[in-house]
Image: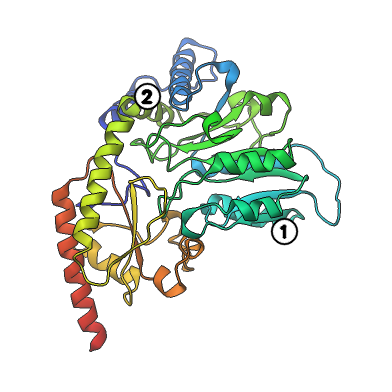
Amino acid sequence: MIYFDNSATTKPCHEAVKAITDALTENWGNPSSAHFAGDSAHRAVEEARKTVASALGIRRAADGKIIFTSGGTEANNLAIFGSVYAKERPVKNGRRGTVIISDGEHASVEVCADALEKDGFRIVRIPTAGGKLDLEFLKREVTSDVILASLMLVNNETGAVYDVKSASKIIKAVSPSAVVHSDCVQAFMKMRFAPSDIGADMISVSAHKVYSAKGAGALYVSKDIITAKKIIPTLYGGGQEENYRSGTEGVPQLLGFGAAVKAMSGKVSERKNYVAELREYAMEKLLKISGVKFNLPEKALPYILSITVPNIKSETLLNFLSGAGICVSKSSACSTHHRNLSRALIAFGLSEEDADSSLRLSFSAENTKEEIDVFCETLEKGISNLAQIKKQ
């Protein structure tokens, strides 16, 4: 198997697998239990929490909280619904307040915004043509009743790095009490940043994007948001995670998360540089294939490369590559169950036809140039074969 779909999920690293196995076979107590087995599990979870916090540049517990969740989707939902509904607000001018997102957000943010819109909130979607937040549009549309802005740091389909910090400054200049959340699932452990670097009060991350198992994620919440009580739980029950997220903690997944982050923490720049070389090599090879076009943001992380192969449906080409043992995707894995076109690519500026003929390659430091050679050879063969079939 040649795997170029690391933005969908990554293969768990050795350290994560070991931590998960140990938690399943040795340290399997309930962290909420009062006996020594529960205490052992609790201490291990807290150590994982510190590791994730440290990787986000949070050095002191007083600087904010890391709330463990089941993944990035739940973290985004908690951030959005937990902050928007934290306080009752009177209806003014027929609306309950304004929420700002970009027009290329992950489904776990966009669908939340749709639900809020139906509930009477005004939703402002910032255009992202070319992979850039339209800050001039934001200046025209921002109002004093903004409750929340949720803006991803790195787009999961194009790799575009959004200027969240500038957007945050614009928003808070007009609405100082607004909460700024950033979905950093595709940025975490791929670039170095802290909440203050991007002007974010809350940050979502996910375990299975950083070489651990699915089923774990985290939401960072700043101390200011906690103190001002600008977030409430969306899950109720036994009061775990300091009442912000009830439900017995998934200790194996959380310990795997912590182990993977710890293993990667010292190699962020090294891995990024290697992947940048791979991406450049891939682009050089792909340039030689007739018809292939790149969808390149002005500022992007090297882990994602979006390409368009005109006149061939992405699903058809994806199936051809899969039959040859090569894994790529046509869009976000969370959108494959919905047959509609990629919102992110349309927002980027692609026509509907080109968006329906695009593939996403997402690299990891485990990939090689030899794998890229095989991919390009197979892609060229697929384009030729599928074009001939189409003529017939």
> Is 154 left, or right, of 295 in this rendering?
right
Looking at the picture, which amino acid does disc 1 mark?
A: Lys
Looking at the picture, which amino acid does disc 2 mark?
A: Ala
Categorize mark 2 by other alpha carbons within 10 Å: few (<14), some (14-19), many (20+). many
Categorize mark 1 by other alpha carbons within 10 Å: few (<14), some (14-19), many (20+). few
Distance between mark 1 and mark 2 Cα atoms: 43 Å
Q: Which residue is mark 2?
A: 23
Q: Is residue 109 above or below residue 307?
A: above
Q: Nearer the viewer, residue 219 or 25?
A: 219
What element does badge 2 sit on?
helix
Q: Which residue is mark 1?
A: 118
- Which is nearer the N-term, disc 1 or disc 2? 2
The residue positioned farthest toward the top in the image shown: 36
Q: In this view of the protein, can residue 230 be seen by the observer? A: yes
Q: Where is residue 264? Give x, y as percent.
A: 32, 29
Q: Is residue 347 above or below residue 106?
A: below
Seen at 57% across and 46% down, the residue is 151
Q: Name the colouring of the figure.
A: rainbow
Front: mark 1 or 2: 1
> Is 233 left, or right, of 281 in this rendering?
right
> Is 208 left, or right, of 86 in this rendering?
left
Seen at 46% across and 41% down, the residue is 185
The quadrant the C terminus occupies is bottom left
